Image (spheres, helix red, strand yellow):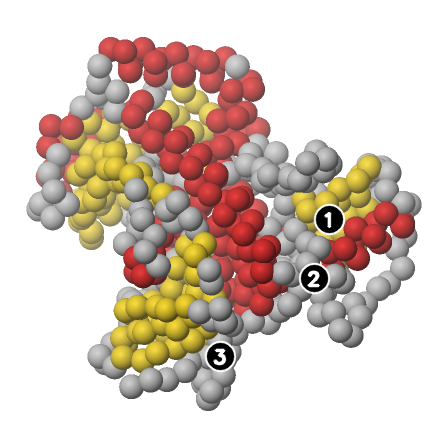
């Protein structure tokens, strides 16, 4: 049985072709689909699971840069209400990172379960018209110069074929999309037999996040704020397969050895083992098919960067895909997704893997290295700032063309503008934002009838800074110039918003 599935809402338009199909309804797929729908693009989101938001998801930490992206979508404050924040990251007992020094509206780590992130993103996606198809499994895909055909199987066992202009695989580390395009996933397992448990505690820990360990065991306890706690642990002397039975007594024993107490844990609602790999796809794009999140890269849980990195992938790809689908940019803009996000994924693999290896240090050489690293980061402000920037995601910058202004490719900090809006508020709706000195007044422009481009929103600095910058929808600088006059600004804007091919 063949069919075509498209359009916004629940009813398909017979014979039409959806511009984009997203596979995987986790945080990465949800933010991507929502962004595309907000740009006026018909999006279908396929998910193999039944329609339900699991309360047993692994991720629980939302870093500053991810909160900034959610703020630009009007969701950050709602998410903050679901969890608790911590302002200190403690590693290896000796190392402490002060999050209050972050140059962000969110100088902390938010502890909240992944299902709260998914709940808000799904509500947004539905409100914007994303078409959801649960219990729908991707079987195969084929692409040509004009689009992609995918074969799917529904929960009733029916097989159908759908066509899209582009497909994005956000379907996790076992990604069917990645396998379908023949993309390898090289790497290794870095730690086996980690366990996860959701429990209640008889004694409340002193902090929202408690982490410690020895050379043989480590454990972490995070509060969800609703009486449930997530426990993660590892025992060097009991590394067993993922399907080996796990009971609460084992969780309590490892926690006592690592933290000195099990806090009277009881009533486990979920127990699971897993192993942690370090893997990355060499290419995030294959023609009209893209990989994002765990489908593109997986790494150790150290630093809590997994879900956050995937959501940053989505924020980078969504505005570019929207610009190409709507005819505002040439196809080669999509190549920058690889050049910008692949190095970030590689850096996250390297940093999270390094943290995990130091945390598990058993021999004297590694323990000495851990002590040196801790002392260096504690004592040296530049090293501390770099470590914080990388873990929280606010320190990454994207490559800039030769001769570009130093700000090009950098994250733009949220600031209050002359209009009274914050930058993240001005970015809502997926807009570019042009920020000029207050003395620069630009005439109102509309795009020519034959050019479907949408001009940027224009704002002014609230202070006397003299640099004009064009901010991308994902909050990074696209263009900047000091002391730019009206002619230079109009030329820069015209090049990007009225002439596809010069982005």
Residue at 70% x, 62% y is 500
**Camera-side residue of 487 and 302:** 487
User: In the image, residue 440 lies at what x, y percent?
Assistant: 89, 48
Judging from the image, what secondary structure is the residue with disc 3 in?
Answer: loop
- Which residue is at a point 39% across and 77% down the rendered structure image? 162
Q: Position of residue 466 (x, y in %)?
A: 84, 37
The label on residue 419 is none
The answer to whether residue 410 is left or right of residue 392 is right
Earlier residue among tags 2 and 3? 3
Instruction: Judge left or right: residue 473 versus residue 17.
Output: right
Separation of marks 2 and 1 at Cα, in angstroms:
17 Å
Point out the frontmost of discs 2 and 3.
2
Is 439 located above or below residue 355 in the figure?
A: below
Q: For numbered disc 1, what is the local secondary structure?
A: strand
Q: Compare marks 2 and 1 and give the one earlier in the sequence.
A: 1
The residue to which callout 2 is attached is: 500
Label 1 Cα neighbours within 10 Å, binned few <14 / some 14-19 / many ≥20: many
Task: Look at the picture and state if 341 lies above or below 11.
Answer: above
* Mark earlier in primary sequence (1, 3): 3
Is there a contact, CB below 8 Å, between mark 1 and mark 3? Answer: no
């Amino acid at each position: 049985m063949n069919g075509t599935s498209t359009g916004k809402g629940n009813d398909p338009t017979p014979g039409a072709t959806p511009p984009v199909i997203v596979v995987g309804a986790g945080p990465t797929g949800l933010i991507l689909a929502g962004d595309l729908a907000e740009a006026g693009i018909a999006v279908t989101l396929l998910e193999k699971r039944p329609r339900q938001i699991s309360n047993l998801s692994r991720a629980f930490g939302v870093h500053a840069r991810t909160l900034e992206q959610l703020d630009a979508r009007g969701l950050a404050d709602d998410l903050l209400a679901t969890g608790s924040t911590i302002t200190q990251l403690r590693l290896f007992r000796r190392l402490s990172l002060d999050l209050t020094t972050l140059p962000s509206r969110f100088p902390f780590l938010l502890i909240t379960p992944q299902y709260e992130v998914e709940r808000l993103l799904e509500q947004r996606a539905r409100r914007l018209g994303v078409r959801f198809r649960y219990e729908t499994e991707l079987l195969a895909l084929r692409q040509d110069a004009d689009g992609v055909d995918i074969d799917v199987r529904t929960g009733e066992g029916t097989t159908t074929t759908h066509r899209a202009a582009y497909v994005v695989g956000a379907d996790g580390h076992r990604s069917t999309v990645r396998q379908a395009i023949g993309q390898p996933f090289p790497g290794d397992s870095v730690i086996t037999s980690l366990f996860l448990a959701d429990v209640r505690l008889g004694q409340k820990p002193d902090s929202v996040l408690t982490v410690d360990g020895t050379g043989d065991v480590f454990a972490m306890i995070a509060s969800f704020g609703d009486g449930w706690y997530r426990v993660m642990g590892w025992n060097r002397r009991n590394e067993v397969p993922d399907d080996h039975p796990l009971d609460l007594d084992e969780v309590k024993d490892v926690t006592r050895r690592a933290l000195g107490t099990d806090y009277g844990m009881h009533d486990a609602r979920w127990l699971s083992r897993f192993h942690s790999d370090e893997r990355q796809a060499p290419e995030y794009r294959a023609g009209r098919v893209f990989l994002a999140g765990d489908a593109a890269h997986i790494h150790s849980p150290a630093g809590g960067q997994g879900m956050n990195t995937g959501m940053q992938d989505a924020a980078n790809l969504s505005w570019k895909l929207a610009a190409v689908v709507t005819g505002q940019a040439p196809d080669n803009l999509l190549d920058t997704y690889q050049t910008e996000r692949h190095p970030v994924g590689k850096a996250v693999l390297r940093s999270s893997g390094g943290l995990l290896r130091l945390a598990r240090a058993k021999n004297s050489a590694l323990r000495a290295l851990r002590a040196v690293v801790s002392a260096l980061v504690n004592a040296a402000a530049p090293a501390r700032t770099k470590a914080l920037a990388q873990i929280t995601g606010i320190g990454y910058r994207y490559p800039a063309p030769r001769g570009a202004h130093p700000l090009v490719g950098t994250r733009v900090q949220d600031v209050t503008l002359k209009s009274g809006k914050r930058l993240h508020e001005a970015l809502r709706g997926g807009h570019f934002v042009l920020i000029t000195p207050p003395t620069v007044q630009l005439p109102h422009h509309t795009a020519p009838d034959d050019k479907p481009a949408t001009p940027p929103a224009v704002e002014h600095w609230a202070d006397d800074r003299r640099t004009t910058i064009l901010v991308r929808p994902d909050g990074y600088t696209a263009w900047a110039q000091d002391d730019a006059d009206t002619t230079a600004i109009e030329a820069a804007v015209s090049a990007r918003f009225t002439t596809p091919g010069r982005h």
